[in-house]
Image (cartoon, helix red, strand yellow):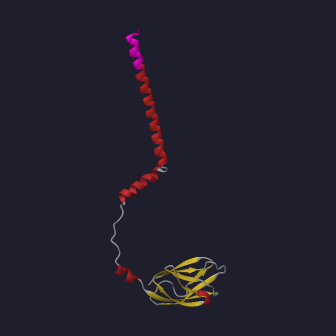
Amino acid sequence: MRRRGSLLEWMWNIVQQGERRIIRVMVLASVVLVLMQLSATRDPVEFYMAMAERVEAPPLDLPPLEKSTLVEAVNIWNVTLKAVPAMPVRVIQNGKVIATLAKGEQQLSVQSGQIQLDGAGISQRVQVQVLKKDPQLLEPRLNQIFVVQGNQLNVSVRP
């Protein structure tokens, strides 16, 4: 027969070993959790700045624009452009080709906003000059010259 003392000692040893294992697992889990948090946040300052932006500057709920405001803002203007030398520079507005400067000089009816001078595929240097414009227009300026050489330029048209 076994003695009672040895059985109690045996059970106490099992409890102590279990406690050690639980402590080891908890320490290991804590280390893994810290490592996962550090890997998720690469730059801690950036994380805190993003959180501050969300708190300090919530998105604004703006009412939709009225159609009448948009209709009033669109005006048609007459502008005359001249390409030197005459090359097929395309004049684009709102995604549509409104003219080509292949003949050299071209009078255009454009809306307020922007036009794009597209010289893609032209290896030669082309100067596009504003010869005439409506007097109410601030941009483009009269006799202003834009240089196009295989690139695209945005030109502002505003009263």
State the residue at coordinates (44%, 24%). Answer: 17
Question: Depth check: 119 or 52 in front?
Answer: 119
Residue 28 is one of the magenta-drawn residues? no
Q: Is residue 71 left or right of residue 138?
A: left
* Residue displayed at 48% across by 86% down: 110
- Above/below status of 2 relative to 98: above
Q: Name the outermost residue toward the top.
A: 1
* Looking at the image, residue 23 lies above or below residue 51: above
Whether residue 102 is situated above or below residue 14 in the rendered picture: below
The quadrant the C terminus occupies is: bottom left
Image coordinates for residue 51, horizontal then vertical, percent: 40, 54
- Dominant SS of magenta comes to helix
Image quadrant where one finds the N terminus: top left
Q: Residue 12's quadrant in the figure?
A: top left
Instruction: Give the magenta-colored segment's residue range.
Output: 1-12
Q: Where is residue 46 in the image (x, y as percent from the top left)?
A: 46, 53
| Residue 64: x %, y % from top left | 34, 73
